[in-house]
Amino acid sequence: MITLPPPEPKTLARRAEIAGALKRIVPDGVIGDEASLTAFDCDALTAYRQRPLLCVLPETADQVAAILNYAGRENVRVVPRGAGTSLSGGALPLADGILLGLSRMSRILDIDYENRCVVVQPGVTNASVTRAVQGRGFYYAPDPSSQIACTIGGNVAENSGGIHCLKYGLTTQNLMGVELVLMNGERLPLGGKHAGDGGLDLLSVVCGSEGMLGVVTEATLRILPKPPVSRTLLIAFSHVRAAGETVAAIIAAGIIPAALEFMDRRCIEAVEAFCAPNYPRDAEAILIGEIDGMPAEVDYEAQAIGEIARAHGATSVRDCVDEADRARVWSGRKAAFGAMGRLEPDMLCMDGTIPRKKLPDVLERISELSEHYGLVCCNVFHAGDGNLHPLIVFDCMSPGALEKAETFGADILKLCVAMGGVLTGEHGVGVEKKALMGEMFSDIDLAQQERLKCAFDGQGLLNPGKVFPTLHACVELGRMHVKDGRLPFANLPRM
Amino acid sequence: MPSVSPLNEAEAADAVREAAQTNSPFEIVAGGTKRDYGRPVTAEAVLDVSALSGIVKYEPEELVLTVRAATPISEINAVLAEKKQMLGFEPCDWGPLFGAQAGRATLGGVVATNACGSRRVKAGAVRDHVIGCRFVNGKGEVIKAGGHVIKNVTGFDLPKLMCGAFGTLGVLTEITLRVSPLPERVAVLAITCEPETGFRLLREAAKLPLDVSGLAYVPAERLGTSYIRVEGAQTAVAQKLAELQKRFAGQSGKPLDGAAAQECFRAIGDGASFADGRSDLWRLCVPATSAPEALLAARTEKTGPWCADWAGGLLWLGLPADADTAMRLRSLTARFGGHATLMRAGPEARAELALFEPETKTRAAITQSVKAAFDPKHILNPGRMFEGI
């Protein structure tokens, strides 16, 4: 179970006054009635719910600045939220916190083909960025599976990935700049249409900071010219190990596919029953590879991948014949999460990353754990970059099932770390995995990260209770407050 | 100047802890090739970390390499080349710009100064390749951050913050990188043209789906040259080159292959045309579309050599290190967006002028707070970037 910071009774008692103040900033955007607030109780980690104190939906960066300035002055906690699609509870509200929803800030501000970038407000959905530029042959590369709903603000906060990360990077590699509003209401532009910044690379830590450093009110995104050709290969294996070895051999041969996805037998069966993408029935594992680029490079890579796969014991290698065929093969992968619903009503999606070569060992161990807990676990996997998505299915109406599924999930993540991997590849730590941070980091490591938060948000008001296993006040971490660029008592020696 | 030379990470941590206790700041040095890049450090002692060298772990099939921070780039390149891999950010060797021998730069210094080359237009900066690190903070604590896998969002991305921080936040001891396959073939289309045309061609090439890996312009007495680089498998490069030649058929273009193709971009990234002598040198970053205008406005009759990289997004400018020039360049960054860095100048100018883009009050306060979060006693390279940083 997770714990959130205990609500401040003083803040709870001031609810009406805070609502009034927010209404003065955003007259038509404050939600305070219980029924409407219910819609904001949770994000996509639905096992955890918390009614926020109030919800405010600003339309402009000025309003965001005024809200944060007010909250900072009045010592009120703030939880930013995009579309609420976080799988790690990154936007889980606080009982005494203002939920700051950015969904109304959904305008594309500038499309600049000459500088190959787009400037958007944070509430713009991921998919609509590509939609806005595809007519001119461009696209935005990061493509988290929630892309029709999730927003760029959330993508920046979580450093979202997708299936094309190995070749095209995560959000951080495709983010050129942001305007960040700090907890005191000041605006901090970072990066832009130019390369980098002159000073410290603050943009690099803002991306993936899970809404704990500031609120993004504008983002400049890199767009890429769409490759002229894409091809999809469906490769079947009778052994999981052979599939794993094939992935390693493809990479070792110097080929970086646009996507390389793995599914195990359990997952293949569930998906076949759900949407019949016509995967090979007898396969223990399949790989779906996508390659893109100029025709000659796609031909070369398709042939090389086919040869490598056969040499490593692939039972079949199928090159999709046309767009419809490609769409059908991908439909199965994209429906994998939905297909779990046929097995059990509830699902936990894990997100560890492992060194690719450990895949067979990790899958074997997951299968043992699955038996131990008596819970089914299907595996889909961004094989190209080692990002595992074990899907644990269960029925939360059955007593103790959620707790059991969570313990199983935690065991998988601990296993990932023990194998040289990490807790989360693209979903974020949020509330879901914060208790496991000690598996990867020492208290000293974590205190260093927390001090970075303090540098941006000295009062600890912005999205507290996420990422870190224990909530520390900044003073406990030994931070010295710097005001107007001066340390307190700058002339005194510090021991 | 007294020097402390730790033999390993634990000794480095001891040295910093002791220095923090006695308030004795260090200048951090490994290869020592870029000590004159940045403001003069206000320290009476040197922390020589050059012994923290060597490959810790290399897994070619994972595309991941872990090395101790002071490992020479030349050693890393050699080890990677054996497995047909490379550092994707095309590390620059800026040593000769500061009077040092070529080939002496270490990974730690390259990371600290964000010394990435022309390949940035395709593959990003140094920070896009650093996936994990260990460092000693200003309290003498050893901190681990990031991981050893390419895709990781666990905790704040501190390894990326270390890139370009000039050692002001921590002493890097170990760095984990994602590495890239070495392309089978690299080719360049060199087009002779006026700067204005040259910049336009570079931007047009960037909009083609050819995944170009270098876009530079080098002026000459009369007409200069636009260099457009493509890479990949043999057949793919042939097709990309053909596509470029078709697209720019009206221009006088000449394909370069092999060593000639490699050499022209190496020279641009390393700033080779500025390596002779010690004349003042600026780097100006603006949006690519603003480059022609910025170039015109930046140059005066006193202008020395210049060249452009990143489709015009980076201008190397031989301009004097004086207050007038600083003001002129910063009025351009204010107008177009971007930043100007005085990369090379004499010690007096480096002590007096703002070498890095001056920060707004809001940003300066955050920079100060971040410094305090990592190095509260200002032990590590104090003053290297800004006053007090």
Image (tube, coloured by chain):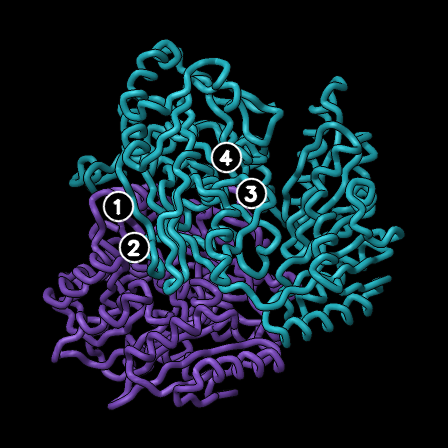
Residue that appears at 26% across and 53% down? B382
- Disc 3/disc 1 C-alpha distance (Å): 34 Å
- Mark 3 vs mark 4, foreground winner is 3
Q: Secondary structure at mark 2?
A: loop
Q: Which numbered marker is on residue A148? A: 3
Q: Are marks 4 and 2 in contact (CB under 8 Å)?
A: no
Tell me the crowding category of disc 4: few under 14, some 14 to 19, or many 20 or more residues within 10 angstroms, Cα based. Answer: many
Q: CA distance from mark 2 to mark 3?
A: 35 Å
Task: Please rate how many residues cluster around mark 3, counting C-alpha atoms within 10 Å: few if below 14, some from 14 to 19, many from 20.
Answer: few
Task: Read off the residue under disc 4.
Answer: A83
Foreground mark, 2 or 3? 3
Q: Is A211 or B245 nearer to us in this picture?
A: B245
Q: Colour of chain A?
A: cyan
Percent across and percent down for residue B2 are 28, 61
Label 1: chain letter: B
Please indicate, yes or no, whether residue B243 appears anywhere in the rendered image. Answer: yes
Instruction: Look at label 1 and name its amino acid.
Output: Arg
Q: CA distance from mark 4 to mark 1?
A: 29 Å
Q: Which quadrant would residue B271 be assigned to in this image?
A: bottom left
Q: Mark number for residue B363?
A: 1
